[in-house]
Image (cartoon, grey):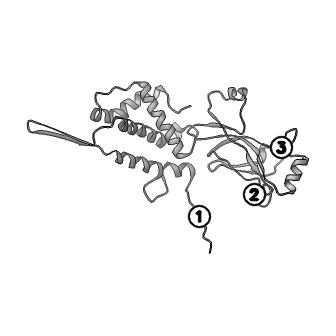
C-alpha cells in the first residue's frame, strides 16, 4: 500500500516538478503513472531509511489465514516471529517486558503464550494487564482485575526448572506505524516529494554546468546534486553533529554506550 495515489500527481507536477523541469529537461514528458511511481519509490526508500511503517500496518506473529487477511481490508500487514520466553520474564522489575520489533505501536490486539506441547496450548494475557509506551514500542504486563490462569504442562515445567529459554513462545498481534501521516507529519510528506524530484533529476542525468552565448548575451547554469542530497540528509537526521530530523522525531534521541574492560 501507499500514502499516495493518482490524486496526488497533479499537485506534484505543478508545484514540485515544474520548478526544475523547465530548466533541466524541458522536452521530457512524464506520464501520471511515471510520476506516481517516482513518488511511491521515494516513499518506500524513506520508510526503509527511517525504519518505520509510514501507514498503519498489522503485525501477525504467524502466517495469517485468508480470512484474517480479508478482515483487514486494505490495511497492509507483515509477519514476524514470536518473542522468546525466559525464566526472568516476570521477575524483578521486568513486568513481562517486551520491546517490539516495529515501532511506534498504535495498538496491541493480543498477547498469548503458545506452549510447545504435543497438543499446543494457548493462553492469552488479559488486555487490561498491558501497559504500553507506544512511541518506543515497550510493553509491560501489570496484573489488574482480570485473572490469568495458565496451568504448566510437563514440557514447560522441565524447561523452566532447567532455566531454559523457550524460543518464539510469546506471540504479539499489534498495529504499528504512523497514523494519518499526511496530516500529522507534513514535514515527512514534504521530504518524500522532494526526494522524488531529486530522483527524477538523477535519472535525467543533466549536465553539471552549461552556458549559452549569442550576440553579446550569455546564460549559464549549474547543478550540484550533492546540495540536494545534503538537504535531504539534514531533513532526515538533522544538521551534521546533531541528533535531530525526522529520525529523532519518530524514534526519539539515539545514543550508544561503549563498554570498556580493564
Mark 2 — residue?
A: 94
- Can residue 167 be seen in this snapshot? yes
Label 2 sits on a secondary structure element that is loop
Which is more N-terminal, label 3 or label 1? 3
Q: Nearer the viewer, mark 2 or mark 1?
A: 1
Q: Residue at x 44, y 25 (%)?
A: 33
Q: Residue furthest bottom?
A: 262
The earlier-in-sequence mark between 2 and 1 is: 2
Query: Mark 3 or mark 2: which is in front?
Result: 3
Q: Is residue 241 left or right of residue 261?
A: left
Q: Residue at x 56, y 53 (%)?
A: 252
Q: Position of residue 16 (x, y in %)?
A: 37, 35
Report which quarter residue 223 is drawn in. top left
What residue is at 41 percent from the left and 27 percent from the top? 10
Q: Residue furthest left?
A: 215
Along the line of sight, the residue nearer the viewer: 199 or 8: 199
List x then y, in percent, for residue 217: 11, 38
Judging by the rendered image, the residue that carries numbered circle 1 is: 257
Crowd tier of the residue under label 1, counting other residues whose Cα lies within 10 Å: few below 14, some 14–19, many 20 or above = few
Residue 119 percent across, percent down from the top left? 88, 38
Q: Residue at x 45, y 53 (%)?
A: 238
The residue pinned by badge 3 equals 116
Amino acid at each position: 500500500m501507499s500514502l499516495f495515489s493518482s490524486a496526488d500527481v497533479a499537485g506534484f507536477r505543478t508545484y514540485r516538478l515544474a520548478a526544475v523541469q523547465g530548466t533541466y529537461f524541458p522536452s521530457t514528458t512524464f506520464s501520471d503513472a511515471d510520476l506516481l511511481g517516482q513518488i511511491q519509490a521515494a516513499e518506500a526508500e524513506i520508510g526503509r531509511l527511517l525504519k518505520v511503517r509510514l501507514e498503519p500496518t498489522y503485525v501477525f506473529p504467524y502466517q495469517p489465514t485468508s480470512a484474517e487477511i480479508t478482515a483487514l481490508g486494505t490495511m497492509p500487514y507483515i509477519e514476524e516471529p514470536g518473542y522468546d520466553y525466559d525464566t526472568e520474564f516476570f521477575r524483578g522489575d521486568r513486568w513481562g517486558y517486551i520491546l517490539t520489533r516495529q515501532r511506534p505501536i498504535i495498538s496491541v490486539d493480543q498477547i498469548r503464550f503458545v506452549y510447545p506441547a504435543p497438543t499446543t496450548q494457548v493462553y492469552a494475557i488479559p488486555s487490561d494487564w498491558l501497559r504500553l509506551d507506544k512511541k518506543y514500542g515497550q510493553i509491560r504486563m501489570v496484573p489488574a482485575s482480570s485473572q490469568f490462569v495458565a496451568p504448566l504442562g510437563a514440557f514447560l515445567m522441565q524447561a523452566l526448572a532447567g532455566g531454559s529459554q523457550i524460543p518464539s513462545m510469546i506471540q504479539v498481534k499489534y498495529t504499528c506505524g504512523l497514523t494519518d501521516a499526511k496530516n500529522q507529519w507534513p514535514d515527512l510528506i514534504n521530504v518524500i516529494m522532494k526526494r522524488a524530484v531529486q530522483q527524477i533529476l538523477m535519472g535525467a542525468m543533466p549536465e553539471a554546468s552549461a552556458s549559452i552565448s549569442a550576440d553579446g548575451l550569455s546564460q549559464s547554469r549549474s547543478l550540484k546534486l550533492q546540495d540536494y542530497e545534503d538537504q535531504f540528509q539534514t531533513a532526515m537526521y538533522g544538521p551534521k553533529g546533531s541528533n535531530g530530523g525526522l529520525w529523532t522525531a519518530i524514534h526519539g534521541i539515539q545514543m550508544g554506550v561503549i563498554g570498556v574492560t580493564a
